[in-house]
Amino acid sequence: MFSKIRSLIFKIDPETAHNLAIKSLKLNLTPNFMNENKDDPMFKSTLFGKEIDNPFGMAAGFDKNAEVYNSLFKLGFGFVEVGTVTPLEQYGNPKPRVFRLVEDRALINRLGFNNLGAENISKRIRSNSNKGLLGINIGPNKDSRDRLNDYLIGLRTFHDIANYITINISSPNTENLRNFHDENKFSELMNSIQEEKVKLRSKIPIVVKISPDITEEQIGLISKVLLDYKVSAIIVSNTTSKNREKLNDILKHQKGGLSGKPLEEEANKLISKFYKLLKGKIEIIGVGGIDSGKSAHKKFLAGASYLQLYTGMVFQGPNIVGKIKKELKEILIADGVKNFKEIIGKKRAN
Ligand SMILES: Cc1cc2nc3c(=O)[nH]c(=O)nc-3n(C[C@H](O)[C@H](O)[C@H](O)COP(=O)(O)O)c2cc1C
C-alpha cells in the first residue's frame, strides 16, 4: 500500500512530508493492520531491566518533540527514543535542511536540533504516559556557553520520566559537538553525569550515542571510559559526514549527516569493533541503514543486542517493523535459530 502513495509523498519536500507523517500518527490515521499479530516470542527481550516485545526501536530524530511515541509503539516498535531535546527551544538551521537521495536510499539532514525545548517536552510526556519503553535523547543548545551543563539540565529534567537517557555527542549539525569524543572531554562529561545522578539519587540508565566518523584510537579510548563509568549502552551510530564518493544522487554534496543504506556497512564495522572491546559488558544498540530482515540480521551478527531505525521508514513506510520481523523470523528459522539472541556477535572473522 505504501509503495502506491510513495511517489506522491516523494513529490513533497522531505521535512513537510515528515510533518505530515507526524500529524497522521497523532490522529491515528496510519492503518493499524501492521501490528495486529502479537510479536513472536523469539523476539522477546529485556532492555534495562524492562521486558520489551521486540528489540526494534525508533531512532532519535523522528519524534523530536515527543508527539507520537505511543502511536509508534502501536506500529510495532519495541522501544522509542524521542529527541534530541535541548534545554531551550530552538529553530535549527535554515530550510531546506533535509534531502532525500532516492537513488541511494539515503537522507542527508542538517536540521540542527530543532525542538521545543526541555520544559515543553517534559510537560508533554508527563501528561501522556508512555505505553512502552521510552528513551529521551538530550543535547546542548547551539549557542550555549556551557554545553556540558546543558546535558545536566537534560538529565535533571527527564531522569524521573524516561526509561533511559541518551547523551548525544554525535550530531554533525551542531558545530564542534563531536569534540566530546575526545578522551578528556568525554571523561569529564561522563564524570559530571555520574555526579549529577548521585545528587538526584537517580538510577536512570545512561546511553551514549556516538559518531561513525571516529578513529581507531578514539574507539579504544571511548570504550575504556564507557567501561570505567559503567554506562548502560552505546548507540552505534549517528549519521556520517563522510562516504559521499560512492553516492549517485545529485544531492550527494549537500552539507549534513548521511543516513540510510550508505551508512550501513560503516556502522556494522564499528559495531563489531565495539563488541570486541566491550565484551558484552555494555549493550550495543545498532543503527544505520536497517530496512529489511537481512539488514537486521547483519547488525545482530556484528554484535548489537538491540536495533533502531529511521531512514528505512521514510523509504518503506510505517509497515517496516512488521516487515523486518517477518523477514528476520524466516532467516532465523531457516538457520535453525530459535531466538534472535543466539546470533548476537556471531559474525565470523574475515
Ligand atoms: C532527519 C533526521 C533527523 C535526525 N535527528 C536526530 C536527532 O535529533 N538526534 C539523534 O541522536 N539522531 C538523529 N538522527 C540520526 C538517527 O537517529 C540515526 O542515528 C541515523 O539516521 C542512522 O539510522 P538510519 O540509517 O536508520 O536512519 C536523525 C536522522 C535523520 C534522518
Image (tube, grey):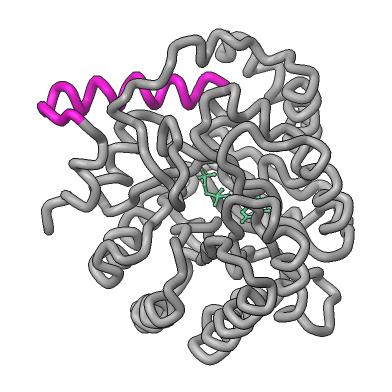
Question: Does residue 344 appear in this view?
Answer: yes
Foreground: 253 or 105?
A: 105
Can residue 336 be found in the magenta stretch? Answer: yes
Can residue 249 be found in the magenta stretch? Answer: no
Vertical placement of residue 303 versus 290, above or below: below
Which residue shows up at 85% across the image and 75% down it? Answer: 143
Residue 133: image x %, image y %? Answer: 56, 41
Residue 232: image x %, image y %? Answer: 45, 63
| Lateral position of residue 142 relative to residue 311, left or right | right
Which residue shows up at 28% across the image and 66% down it? Answer: 273
| Lateral position of residue 19 relative to residue 55, left or right | right
The quarter in which the C terminus is drawn is bottom left
Residue 302: image x %, image y %? Answer: 26, 52
Question: Does residue 112 appear in this view?
Answer: no
User: Magenta residues: mostly which secondary structure?
Assistant: helix
Foreground: 128 or 265?
A: 128
Which residues are drawn in magenta? 318-338
Q: What is the quadrant of residue 341 in the picture?
A: top left
Vertical placement of residue 65 versus 243, above or below: above
Vertical placement of residue 33 versus 112, above or below: above
Which residue shows up at 75% across the image and 57% down it? Answer: 85
Residue 160: image x %, image y %? Answer: 69, 56
| Lateral position of residue 57 relative to residue 271, left or right | right
Which residue shows up at 53% across the image and 61% down it? Answer: 205
The quarter in which the N terminus is drawn is top right
